[in-house]
Amino acid sequence: MPGADPVAVVGVGAVGTLLAKLFCTDTAMTVTTHAVQNLGAVGYTTRYPAERYMREAKVLQIFEGSNQIQRLIISRKLNSDHTP
């Protein structure tokens, strides 16, 4: 829905989906960043798949709304549920 408030569109069950996407993409980015750092300069080459996994993890964070926007929507939804 163009122009609609994203918080109003998100249902109760969708918050769990947003939280799962947020957790998984952040975890993937953390793990791949550590893998590339452990490999050192070689980690940035195409010789090891860690470089490709790191790029893919970053794309997943951006795809379907950036994680920062996901956090904003989740916090607004949780706040609106508890406002009297």
Image (spheres, grey):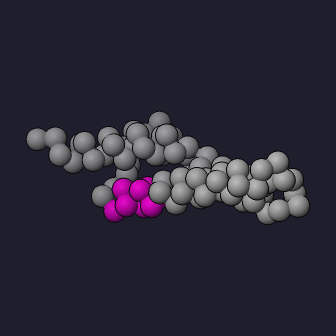
Looking at this view, is 42 or 52 the one in front? 42
Q: Quadrant of residue 11?
A: bottom left
**Percent position of residue 6, x then y:** 41, 43
Residue furthest to the top in view is 3
Q: Quadrant of the C terminus?
A: top left
In this picture, which residue range is highlighted in magenta? 13-21
**Percent position of residue 39, x then y:** 76, 56
Q: Quadrant of residue 52?
A: bottom right
Residue 18 part of the magenta-drawn span: yes
**Percent position of residue 82, x then y:** 17, 46
Looking at this view, is 74 or 27 the one in front? 27
Tell me which secondary structure the magenta stretch mostly adopts.
helix
Residue at position x 36%, y 56% in the image: 15
Relative placement, left or right, of 21 versus 72 is: right
Q: Quadrant of residue 20?
A: bottom left
**Percent position of residue 48, x then y:** 83, 62
Residue at position x 70%, y 50% in the image: 37
Residue at position x 46%, y 46% in the image: 70
Looking at this view, is 36 or 80 the one in front? 36
- Is residue 57 visible in the rendered structure shown here? no
